[in-house]
Amino acid sequence: MKIPALLSLFCAASLAGAQPAVKNVLLVTIDGLRWQELFTGAEDALINKEHGGVPEGAQAGLRAEFGGATAEARREKLMPFLWGTLARQGQLFGNRALNSPVAVSNAERVSYPGYNEILTGRVDPLITNNTPRPNPNVTVLEWLHGRPGFAGRVAASAAWNVFVPIINVGRSRLPVFVTLQRSAPGAVSPRIAEIERWMQDIPPISASESFDAFAYEAALDLIATHRPRVFLLALGEPDEWAHAGRYDRYLDSIRRCDRFIRQLWEILQAQPEYRGTTALVISPDHGRGVLGADWTSHGRKIPRSEETWLVAMGPGIAARGERRDTAPLHQAQIAATVSALLGEDFRAAFPDAAPPVSDLVGPAGR
Ligand SMILES: [Zn+2]
């Protein structure tokens, strides 16, 4: 009996190699969410007026909602899906207290350079700020869209409207929703048209961004109408509230991001087309500072704002949970990782792109 059993194991492994278990990837970005909150939860030193901008009357309630004696207790309150489900089924990199560093490669530590790094697998030294210039580089979204089996099956929804130039919608022609957009009549689905009407009636957070709820709701519609194999959901509120110096709203928006991701994951898992064949990859675009008011900001002048994190789960990704003592990872590796999960070789087209994360796609991750 031993030989046939071994043979069938061998055959299963060969098939897995030829036909990746992952058929779809949901890539989620959370703008400016620090690894400190992801791995240790709410920071008590910021639940005050002086450093965290938390109104007096809200401090006790915030402590009750997000506080806890241990990092484990606090982080589970802040991101219950990541620590309840993803930590059991996938892997979390970036806890520097456990010697698992993740960082941006670009020197700018701001959003457009970060998203360019995530989506193109490399640093473009000419992208130094958030000026909404059409991206000269081809993203992994655009590249996969040109691969067999992906035509018409790649889409994105983003809170930040600079994703239109980041994904270079003019060239890539990908369906991309961004908040604050106003489409011509008939150019979008009835549901997106309704979301656009709501957005007109609600004050935006900033000149380039409205609430994550709009991007989330649009994502549901885009997934229902386009049946994407690759989908980017780019959430943005945590960065906005942090810049505003409001630690209470920053925490609240992080918990909402976690809930949106859980809901989307459950909706996908309820559909035969996605159940058991979809991988989830989540990353921020940069970190933030740590001391005094530095937590509100990031960039070249803010120490430690290059520090990020990366989490993933899905078929074929080993359930190794919170990682420790890992080789340094960079967010430029995400493009090739997303491709490799789908059985596609991004570096064959872009040899200077960073390699995939071997613990997620190589033999070590299987
Ligand atoms: Zn920012």
Image (tube, grey):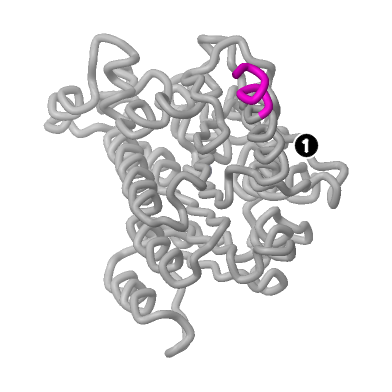
Residue matched to label 1? 354
Q: Where 183 sits versus 168, above or below?
A: below
> Where is residue 339 drawn, in percent x and y?
69, 47
Q: Nearer the viewer, residue 297 or 191?
A: 191
Which residue is pictured at 45% across the width and 42% down the height? 239
Q: Quadrant of residue 326?
A: top right
> Where is residue 25 drawn, in percent x and y?
55, 49
Q: Specify start and end residues of the magenta stretch as a single range.
A: 1-7
Secondary structure mostly taken by the magenta-highlighted segment of the chain:
helix
| Magenta run includes residue 145 | no
Quick check: is the Cβ at mark 1 less than 8 Å away from ligand 1? no
Residue 229 visible in the snapshot: yes
Amino acid type at image mark 1: Ala
Which residue is pictured at 67% across the width and 49% down the height? 119
Residue 300 visible in the snapshot: no
Horizontal relation, residue 164 to residue 290: left or right: right
Q: Where 114 sits versus 195, above or below?
A: above
Image quadrant occupied by the C terminus: top right
Q: Nearer the viewer, residue 286 or 71?
A: 71
Which residue is pictured at 29% across the width and 10% down the height? 70
Which residue is pictured at 53% across the width and 10% down the height? 98
Image quadrant occupied by the N terminus: top right
Graded by Cα atoms within 10 Å as few (under 14), some (14 to 19) or many (20 or more), the crowding at tag 1 reads many
Q: Quadrant of residue 94?
A: top right
> Where is residue 74 drawn, in percent x and y?
29, 20
Horizontal relation, residue 131 to residue 95: left or right: right
Callout 1: helix, strand or loop?
loop
Q: Nearer the viewer, residue 17 or 224?
A: 17
Report the residue that reaches farthest toward the front: 1
Horizontal relation, residue 250 to residue 174: left or right: left
| Magenta run includes residue 3 | yes
Q: Nearer the viewer, residue 292 or 175?
A: 175
